[in-house]
Amino acid sequence: TGASASQGRPACVPASDPEPKEAPGLSQLPIEMLLEVLSYLPTSVLLGQCRHVCWYWRYLVDTRAVWLSILPYSHAKLWPVFRTCLPPDNDDDPRPCLLGRFCERRPLGRNLYPNRHGIDAFRQSTVQAGDRRKAEEDRRLVPEDPFQPFYRWCYKKQVLDLEKEGLWPELLDSGKIEICISAWWADQEASVCLYELIVQLLDAKQARLHHLSPRPIHQGTTSIPFKTNHVFSNLKKGVRFVSLEHWIWDMGFLPEDYGIIVPKASVIVRVCQP
């Protein structure tokens, strides 16, 4: 006891334990472990929340690594196709990774057509029947008077951007993608008119690569619906847009105000059926 006391430390008092270290935050984890953690989160959380935490997390979410961990189980049946045509890893692109956009939008197998119920107004051309092709040069809106007969071509046109929907160029050009088009139209008042559908697949400069124009349908005094279905397969390389045009002539009155059921359409992109 004397020896202990001579050292200035009472023998009955134990030495103090070291203070516990602070638990590491997620950002302090090794990058491989953090990517593994992020890969278990829903796509909406990754792009809507995690990507905005800090520059480091944004960098991680925008890299291909996390999405290459997600795709094999989120699209298990399609992964064998995807792995053969992955987009390049572009670190200079400020936008989210293309694979992340694909996972967010989930464009395969659903209707991508932005106006599937045709609720916007028809437009009126200035040319008469028999010269409908020249109508594309005129883009004036139809008159405001809904009961003014005009006996001219009216049209609706919409262009779908496939890349904005989440489909990357390498996948579109892989030869393993097909585009299914469906259009339906009828006149509920059984007025006399003529209907024509024009579908075009366009490249990045909106030059035509594929074209579909079924024979015009003459609507008489019976309200027989018109429906067409077509599958574009063996796509040429470069398809980036889908254009649908609905043309109607000799209705007597404006379509939305005189009983014309507006055209309905669908554009579905899918992996080619075996």
Image (cartoon, rainbow, N blue to C red):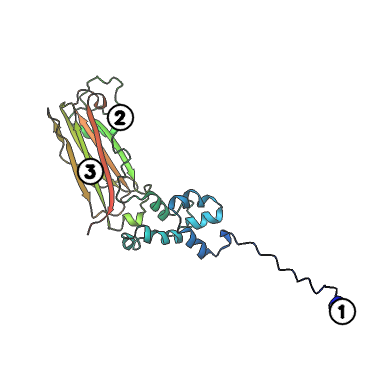
Q: Is residue 10 visible?
A: yes
- 2 relative to 102, above or below: below
- Name the residue at 23% across, 57% down: 273
Identify the mark nearer the N-term, 2 or 3: 2
Q: Amino acid at mark 3?
A: Ser
Q: Residue furthest left?
A: 221
- Image quadrant assignment for residue 82: bottom left
- Name the residue at 15% across, 35% down: 217
Q: Residues within 10 Å of mark 3 (few under 14, many from 20)?
A: some
Q: Quadrant of the C terminus?
A: bottom left
Q: Amino acid at mark 1?
A: Gly
Instruction: Give residue 219's position: percent from left, percent from top.
Output: 14, 31
Q: Residues within 10 Å of mark 1 (few under 14, many from 20)?
A: few
On the image, numbered disc 2 is attached to which residue?
Answer: 121
Left or right: residue 97 compared with residue 31: left
Query: Tag 3, which secondary structure?
Result: strand
Q: Is residue 86 visible?
A: no
- Image quadrant assignment for residue 79: bottom left
